[in-house]
Amino acid sequence: MNKIYSLKYCHITKSLIAVSELARRVTCKSYRRLSRRIIRSSVAVLSLSSIWPALAATVSAEIPYQIFRDFAENKGQFTPGATNIAIYDKQGNLVGKLDKAPMADFSSATITTGNLPPGNHTLYSPQYVVTAKHVNGSDTMSFGYARNTYTAVGTNNNSGLDIKTRRLSKLVTEVAPAEVSDVGAVSGAYQAEGRFTAFYRLGGGQQFIKDKNGNLTQIYTNGGFLVGGTVGALNSYNNGQMITTPSANIFNPSQGPLANYLIMGDSGSPLFAYDSWEKKWVLIGVTSSMTSSGNNWVVTTQDFLGQQPQNDFDKTITYTSGTGALQWKYDAANGTGTLTQGNTSWDMHGKKGNDLNAGKNLLFTGNKGEVVLLDSVNQGAGYLQFAGDYRVSALNGQTWMGGGIITDKGSHVLWQVNGVAGDNLHKTGEGTLAVNGTGVNEGGLKVGEGTVILNQQADADGKVQAFSSVDIASGRPTVVLSDAQQVNPDNISWGYRGGRLDLNGNNLTFTKLQAADYGAIITNNSEKKSTITLDLQTLKASDINVPVNTINFLGGKGTPGDLYLDGSTGQYYILKANSYSPFFSDLSNSSVWQNVGKDRNKAIDTVKQQKIEASSQPYMYHGQLNGNMDVSIPKLSGKDVLALDGSVNLPEGSITKKSGTLIFQGHPVIHAGMTTSASQSDWETRQFTLGKLRLDAATFHLSRNGQMQGDINAANGSTVILGSDRVFTDKNDGTGNAVSSVEGSATATTAGDQSDYSGNVTLENKSFLQIREKFTGGIEAYDSSVSVTSQNAVFDRVGTFVNSSLSLEKGAKLTAQSGIFSTGSVDVKENASLTLTGRPSVEKLGYYSPVISTTEGIHLGEKAGLSVKNMGYLSSDINAGNTAATINLGDSDTAAGKTDSPLFSSVMKGYNAALRGSITGAQSAVNMNNALWHSSGNSVTRSLKATGSRIELGDGKNFATLQVKELTADNSVLLMHTNNSQADQLNITDKLSGSNNTVLVDFLNKPASETNVTLITAPKGSDEKIFKAGMQLIGFSNVTPVINTEETDTTTKWVLTGYQAVSDAGASKTATDF
């Protein structure tokens, strides 16, 4: 069982004292200091005679303990459904893999059980839990998150086995019940190589670690937490009613990579098995006892687990069509009532006095049934289950209270009955509940499964409210709004794993978002677009209710920020942790408690002020925004910052942010018992898809692990940072408590963790874009600026810059595939590189369409790079100053850069790439492969390598000089112009090499028969065969320049001395025919 105390001998009192098994080290001296406080406490001490031996887990010290904790809470890598999970030891060695089954979902186990360890009860039916019979000491328990509390009101003990079931006061909406195996107590059913291929368990009693030398070390839990792991194949005894395995040897591979041996504190905790036939996890047992070699479980059979639910039903009600509605009468004093149809009556039982368990469940069968409440009903723990379509109404404003409503799959229930203030209607079942009462319903709704349609009608005064509050949990339900008046949006919350709120074409405004985790979904499935406004506001003192809790001397769990009273001293404390130790031992620990004095009103005011301050911190939303809707985010009160670490899927919608800051980011992986941190290395990637993000004087960050698809329109001094290191984490993430945001800085350490943007960014009116990480898209910038630091930026759409700057910062890499058009210059700074290509073909690999880029100039920094290739055409001057930049024109890869575009001949002139502009770079290198360079002005470069390329100097009006220190040219063409007295010139100062190059000359006026114009100058001794004169068709003649070489003391010159012209017969014939 769960041993509430350990017995320790105290030499001062000369007696045994009881020390909580959840306590940290408690000495006899500390006991003496606390004894009077305990005696004064209003909480009664349990009799020691009621203490039973108990069980807890011993696990391997070789494996990080956090692994066992994450396993039990489905956190870290152990999310339900995960496969092939690798387990490593502390040295990073692979211990094994969980590859026999997908990861189990343990949410059906209790997360808290009052003062008992967590995990010792398991939900197997929406209102029923199972545990070991000897587990006693608490009637309260929580599922999913600790704030969801349920009370056990009835028990069914097994007469011969250590197992019992318990009934709860309400249907559990936070989690789905565990499925119970239909195999049951069959000898040998759970042995090796059988139907069940994996066995997992979890629990929360005392915990120990054990090394390979057998040394045990206790882990102190301060309130208890869950651990879990693997269990080996099971042997049966006691006619199959008990199963056992030799789990004491936790280093035996047969017990799995996460073996654990139960010794004290884990009684009643569940054992799950993977049914390889049904492809699902099922509950097969509850922990009962131990031996020196292993552990024993009582097999959970459907027969026994079904006894209590079956006994809690009144007689099934069957509606008969055509005989009128079922008339429901109820006598609150006696807790009994009748449902009558014609001459047939059914008795029912409700709450009797304070006995909730006296209320029985009712099952309604038949179809198109009608029920009319003639009296208000309090059914206690009894719930209503509908196996067909029904309408339930009240004759004259009668109300209903009870355990909840189950609507079976395929059923539709029209619910026209209001609830009671302070009570919640709990709804489960896959069917639909359509709420259609009248006026203001003071009761709340907690929905955990199926669909609820809110369609409350206005009363005579025009007032309408379907529920005072709506809580959506477990990830299974959908709540649909018929209009915007059904419920105050600020009273909608999403609990454990959340669910869907369907706006159904309506518009809502939230001033607070209460979303516990990623499961929270706001969606619109209507064809009519919805708009939600996130006008988030800080809390007001009048909105805050501060209950005063009493400190439990046995310790416990709570919500940070809540107010507690020490009844023995009259002192008030604010809890700062998620749990506190027994015997008031940590009241002086400032990390657990804040002492706020003995004045009740001042203490309450302090709590309110702290909650107001917390609410003014940057806002966060962990959930999802989906469907056909737009989102508007005005200026927010407090700190005008909203971070979304859930996801957005609004492909036809928009998000608009006015002023302040909006952040899209990934989400740090939650680990059991740990606060998420910006510095942790493991993050979950989140997707943000939307039609357009509009920013008006606002700042937007796309941070690590955020992937965004959608256009951005930033105006009026807005700032867009794609690849920001600014992130927010939530101190309460994974606890279900209110968001407590913490700003941090986080930079992706791997390529997979980098942010990734795809879309078109439009900047207007002094806005700024910084691209730091993955970018694919286009830019339109007007009177704005763009900075690129990313090494993975691609413009696959047009980049337009009007009165706007584009700067590639140190080390940046940008590829533009659809052209850059700029009225200004482009800066490519130190070690940065800019690549301009044509547009890649989607259908044909390696094919491109020619694309023209034009700027007023490109400035290259030290070791910067500029590449134009694969049908890229650049019209711009390039200035590298005295830096050692590299300019590459064309591509030597013959498999790339193909095209079937007609522009290949007219624009590209048959080359892979083209540049029109001068190059200034005395220390820079130019490499040309199958490229065209038209240098209309003077150019200078340190080196030039041209292969299969064409260089055209001058523009026919002005002559140009190309000055190169070292030129290597092969199979290339040089085109120059002359007016018979002047010409374009190529000057090589240091070295000339290469072969088979052709010089073409364009005569700007009628060629002279004799000229003497120097075209090329190279160092003395250069090979005169490197260049040869080339023929070209001018008019109707083939004209070949006459070029001679001359040697001087220092140079070799290629001099134009005349020309030869031969009539082209083909051209003449074409002209004559024309």
Image (cartoon, helix red, strand yellow):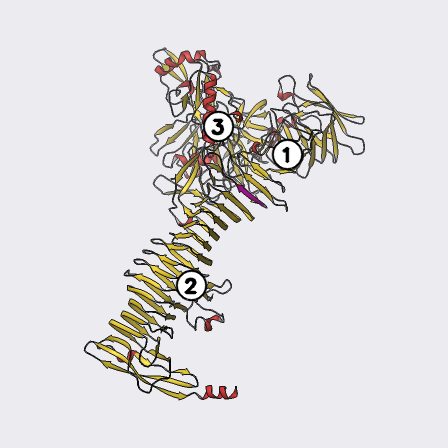
How would you rate the neighbour count of disc 2 (Cα within 10 Å): few for under 14, some for 14-19, many for 20 or more? Answer: many
Looking at the rendered image, the disc whose residue lies closer to the viewer, 2 or 1, is 2
Q: Is residue 575 left or right of residue 1001?
A: right
The answer to which of 247 and 703 lies nearer the viewer is: 703
| Cα distance in 3D space between marks 2 and 3 | 68 Å
**Residue segment shown in magenta:** 629-640
State if disc 3 and disc 1 touch (CB < 8 Å).
no
Provide the residue designation for mark 2: 854
| Cα distance in 3D space between marks 1 and 3 | 37 Å
Q: Amino acid at mark 2?
A: Thr
Q: Is residue 695 left or right of residue 814?
A: right
Where residue 372 sits: x, y (%)? Answer: 74, 28
Where residue 572 sits: x, y (%)? Answer: 44, 18
Identify the mark nearer the N-term, 1 or 3: 3
The answer to which of 816 and 225 lies nearer the viewer is: 816
Where residue 1043 sits: x, y (%)? Answer: 30, 83
Asked if residue 636 is among those painted magenta in the image, a careful observer would answer yes
Residue 167 location, quadrant = top right
Q: Amino acid at mark 1?
A: Gln
Identify the mark nearer the N-term, 2 or 3: 3
| Cα distance in 3D space between marks 2 and 1 | 58 Å
Q: Amino acid at mark 3?
A: Pro
Provide the residue designation for mark 3: 118
Provide the residue designation for mark 1: 486
The answer to which of 396 and 780 lies nearer the viewer is: 780
Identify the mark nearer the N-term, 2 or 1: 1
Q: Is residue 837 visible?
A: no
Image mark for residue 1024 = none
